[in-house]
Each structure stands twice: as structure tokens, then as C-alpha cells.
Amino acid sequence: MPGSIWVHGEIGADGGLARISTEVATVGRALAEAGGRELVGVVVSAEPAAAAAELARFVPRVMAMTEPTTADHAAGTIVGQRLAALAQREQPDYIVTGAGAEGRDLAGVLSALLGWGVLANATSASWSDDGPLVVMSVFGGKLNTTSGFTGSRGIVTVRPNVATAEPAATPGSVEPVSVEGELSLPMVKVVDRIEEATAAAPIEEAKVIVAGGRGIGGPDGFTMVQELAGLLHGAVGATRAAVDSGWIGYSQQIGQTGKIVKPQLYLALGVSGAIQHKVGMQTAETIVAINRDPDAPIADFADVVVVGDLFEVVPALIAELRARQV
Ligand SMILES: Cc1cc2nc3c(=O)[nH]c(=O)nc-3n(C[C@H](O)[C@H](O)[C@H](O)COP(=O)(O)OP(=O)(O)OC[C@H]3O[C@@H](n4cnc5c(N)ncnc54)[C@H](O)[C@@H]3O)c2cc1C
């Protein structure tokens, strides 16, 4: 009898469903359709109702479990234990989750408790006769590997911004579930939550990103980047060169060792377009580069290249945007 694929619904900062889980649900739905499996969403949280209802827009059936300890503890370990108990009872074939901080914790705990393998950081997934085939980007995007599970069960983590979330044609239903047993693994207590003040918006969610590279020249240059981002209602991103120079925080780094982003507009200022940066932003809908070097690698994949000194082009752009706002 065909089994099921579970998709884990993570809680976002606003208490609803995290955006990554809408992408995970879309990937899971494609796998379930191709593999002829039942698709089930699972949300475990102190207050799962809102996220579960949102997840039901993507999957036919959602199990919602109330777990009060997640209110003031890091969720991954706790959700992992509850999901493992539920999986032992219900026997799904595969569990798909996001490759963010929570998903990574969750995948580790599930793997240890269930003895299942993990295919981590999927950039895409398809179905073969033997189950999911997972594509992963390795060596800084120079190589893609395709891997499958040796057994008939497994856990897949999906990188943020590699899939476009699409709700199902018909919304699903939500049902409450519970499992017995104590939480036995050590928990991480959350003592404080601090909102980052540096960016106008979290870069993973931003529709517009203005990214600064080494060409920005220093921390003062990022004031200009911030100003342009503000005028475009976007967020500030950066290359590793800018982050390593201490001009901006690591949370804004885009690329292989930073974040993967997928905005509608990516404006790259003084960014050469090294492969390690490209893997983090190449799926942006429109890439506009401002660079004084017409042969910079970014010219090969940008939609528009403005060849010029950014210290002339960007102030002119800011002045024009300001003039239009008046
Ligand atoms: C294992 C590993 C992981 C890495 N991970 C990442 C990662 O996650 N993210 C990342 O970004 N990098 C990463 N890197 C580093 C990466 O290889 C590049 O070194 C880095 O992306 C270069 O940053 P940049 O484009 O800002 O600087 P540069 O390559 O120095 O480019 C600066 C650009 O600015 C232009 N410029 C200079 N002045 C002006 C001006 N006045 N007006 C207009 N244009 C100007 C130049 O023409 C040039 O093209 C990684 C490297 C390694 C080895």
C-alpha cells in the first residue's frame, strides 16, 4: 500500500506559517503526486492553529499538535521528538522540512530517533522508482549532485528560496493530533528575542534587494546602499568581501556561506559576481549590476549592466527616485 510524505510546517516570526514551509509544502506536493503518495502536513507548536490553517492551503490534510514547551524553547529538538513519536505510530515514508536553523535541528533529531537518513540542502527534488532524488549544490555551486535514499524512508531538507510556493487547487483540512510520552532530550531555553535593526526587511523575504560588494569601499558606502534600499522598499544585502571587511553584519551575506535569496529585483553595486555569491542570488527575477568593469563576471548573468562608477550612478539614482516621490 502506498505510504505518505509528510511536510513539516514551521512557525514564522509572526506566529503564522513560515514562508519556507510554503515552499517545502510545494516541493512535497510535487513528490507526492509523482510518487502516488498521500501528502500530509504536520505542525507542532504552542499555538499551531494559524500555521496549520495556512499549511492546509497547500496540502490536503494537516495534523496539528499543541506542544506548550515550544513557546519559550528552541523548537527544533522538541518538534523532532514529537514528530518522531508520531512517525513511529503513523509510519510515513518521507519527511520534508526546510533547511533553515529549525529544520536542520529537526532533521538531526528525527534521524537519530528514527534511524533514517537525511538528504540535506536540496535545491530541487524529483521522484524516481526508488523514492525522492534530491539535487544538492556542492563545491560552491560548481557541481550539482543527485542523491537518493538506500532504504525506503528518509528525511529531506529543502533550502529556502529554491522553489516557488503554490497553493493547492483545493484547500485541505486540519485535524488535532497528540502523542504520549515525556520530552527526554535537553532543551534550549529562549531567554530573549531581538529584532535585527540593520535591514529594512529580512533578506530571505525581500522583493527588492540592494547588495553592496567590495566596490562600495567601506561602511560609509553602505549608508548609500541603505538609502537606495529604503527608497525601493527593499532590504540590504552584501557579499562576503563586504562582510569580512566588517562593513555590514553577517546576517546580510548572500551566497554559498550566506543566504539564498530570490527577490523580484536584485541590484548589485560593486559586486563582481563570484560563483560563491552567484549561487545565493542567481534565481532573482531581474538582476541589475552597477560596475565599472564591463568584463566583471556578473555581466554574464545580469539582465542589465550599468557600466560606470557607482559613486556617480547611485547618487543620481537616489536623486531621481527622490524627485519622483515628491
Ligand atoms: C568557501 C568560500 C565561500 C564563499 N562564500 C561566499 C558567500 O557566501 N558570498 C559571497 O559573496 N562571497 C563568498 N565567497 C567569496 C567570493 O569568492 C568572492 O571573493 C566575493 O564574493 C567577492 O566579493 P565582491 O564581489 O564584493 O568583491 P570583488 O570580487 O573584489 O569585486 C568588487 C567589484 O566591484 C567593482 N567596483 C569597484 N569599485 C567600483 C566603483 N567605484 N564603481 C563600480 N564598480 C566598482 C569591481 O569592478 C569589482 O567587480 C566565498 C569564497 C570561498 C572560498
Image: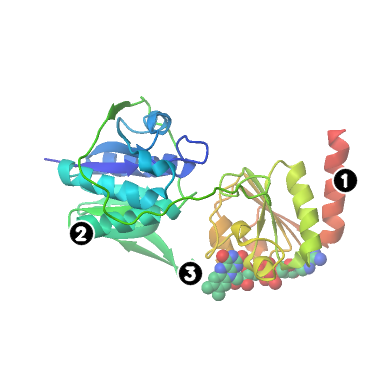
Foreground residue, 30 or 41? 41
- In the displayed structure, 50 sits above or below 298; it is above
Disc 3 secondary structure class: loop
Q: Amino acid at mark 2?
A: Gly
- Mark 2 neighbour class, 10 Å CA radius: few under 14, some 14 to 19, many 20 or more: few
Residue 189 in the image: state x and y as whole percent: 43, 52
- Mark 1 neighbour class, 10 Å CA radius: few under 14, some 14 to 19, many 20 or more: few
Q: Which residue is mark 1?
A: 319
Is tag 3's residue or tag 1's residue first in the polypeptide sequence? 3
Ligand 1 lies under 8 Å from the Cβ of mark 1: no
Q: Which residue is mark 3?
A: 142
Q: Residue at x 26, y 58 (%)?
A: 111
Q: Quadrant of ligand 1?
A: bottom right
Ligand 1 lies under 8 Å from the Cβ of mark 3: no
Residue 156 in the image: state x and y as whole percent: 32, 53
Q: Amino acid at mark 1?
A: Ala
